[in-house]
Image: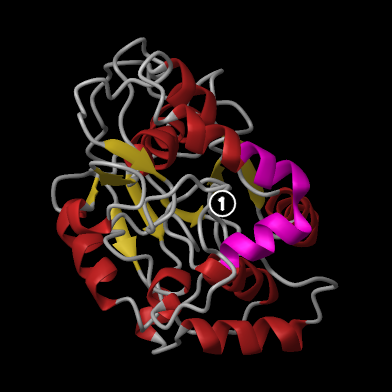
Amino acid sequence: MTQHQHAATAPIRILNLGAGVQSTALALMAHRGGFEHVPKFNLAIFADVGDEPDDVYRHLEWLTNEVKPSFEVRVVRHGSVGLGDSLKIGINATGQMFVSIPAFTADADGDVNSMGLVRRQCTSEFKITPIEREIRRGVLGLAKGQRWPKEADVHQYFGLSFDEGRRVARVTENAKNGHTTPHFPLWDMQWTRRHCMAWLESYGIPHKVPRSACVFCPYKSNSEWRRLRDTDAKGWKRALEIDEAIRDHDTRGQKAIVKRMYLHKSCLPLAQAPIDEPQTNAAQYEMGFVNECEGMCGL
C-alpha cells in the first residue's frame, strides 16, 4: 500500500473539489472542524480540465496549502490533452470522437428562433471519470479491470447547496448504480450559496473565491463574460479561440451537427456577442447552472 492508498476496510471520505464557493466552504469547514455534517476528509480530489481561469488555479494553490495540515488535495486529469484542445482536434483522450459541451446551436449567426442546445458530456468525461479512476487506482490501489472490493467503504462529499435540489436528486439517483455513498453536507445544513459566501468572508480568505468553470463554458451570464474579458486576457483569448473552433468542421468532432455552434446564447460569435447588455435571467446561469446535473462544475 502506497502513501496515497487507504485501507479498504476503513471508511474513506473524499471531497469532490471544484475549487468554487461551495466546495471551498466544505474544505475549510472540514479543516477548521466543529460542523456536525462535515467530517474530516481523507482527501479532496480536483479534476483539472486544463482550461479553468487563472484565478481558479491561484485559489486552488492557496486552498491546498491552507488545508494541508488536515488532508491532501489531489489534482487529476483525464489525459494529456485538455478539454479545449480536445474540442479543437475533435477526439478525446482515448482517441474516440470527442464528447460535446453544451454549446448553443442555430441555423445561422444570430438566428435565435432556431436555437438549440448540444448535449453536455464534458463533465462526465473530464470531471467524473478522472475522479472515479483516481478513487479506484490511487485510493484503493485497484488494477485496471479489477473488481471493486466488497469491504471498501467509500463516501463522496459534494458541494451542492440547499438551492440546488434538482442536482442533489440527480446525483443521488446516479449514485445508485455506483460503488460510493454520496453526501451533501450543505443541503443537510440548509445552507445556500449565499450562506457559503458569507461564511467564506468571515473566514478571512485573502481573495474572492472564484466560480469554477472552464473559460469557454456556455453556462455564463453576460456579467461573467464581461468579467472574463475585462480581467483575464488569457482566458478571454482562449474562449474566443474555442468559440471559433467549434464552428470549424475541420477542427471539431461534432461533424454530424448541421447547425452552427456558439458559446453565447445570442448565437453570435463570442467576439460579436452582446455581452455588455444587461441580462434579467443572469442568476440562473450564474448560480444555478441550468441543465447541469452531475454536481461537479461551478462549485
From this view, report whether residue 288 is shown above or below residue 7.
Answer: below
Task: Identify which residue is drawn at 29% across, 42% down.
Answer: 108
* Among the 4 quarters of the image, the one containing residue 250: top left
From this view, report whether residue 202 is shown above or below residue 247.
Answer: below
Task: Identify which residue is drawn at 38% across, 79% down.
Answer: 281
Quick one: quadrant of the N terminus?
Answer: top right
Q: Secondary structure at mark 1?
A: strand
From this view, report whether residue 286 is shown above or below residue 179.
Answer: below
Q: Nearer the viewer, residue 164 or 282?
A: 282
Q: Nearer the viewer, residue 266 or 197?
A: 266
Q: Is residue 208 left or right of residue 101?
A: right
Q: Which residues are magenta?
A: 224-238
> In the rendering, at what x and y percent does residue 47 appear?
52, 41
> In the rendering, at what x and y percent does residue 21 appear?
58, 70
> Can the viewer see residue 51?
no
> In the rendering, at what x and y percent does residue 125 appear?
36, 33
Residue marked by disc 1: 44
From this view, report whether residue 45 is shown above or below residue 40.
Answer: above
Total numbered badges shown on the rendered structure: 1
- Decide: few, some or many residues near mark 1? Use Cα within 10 Å; few <14, some 14-19, many ≥20: many
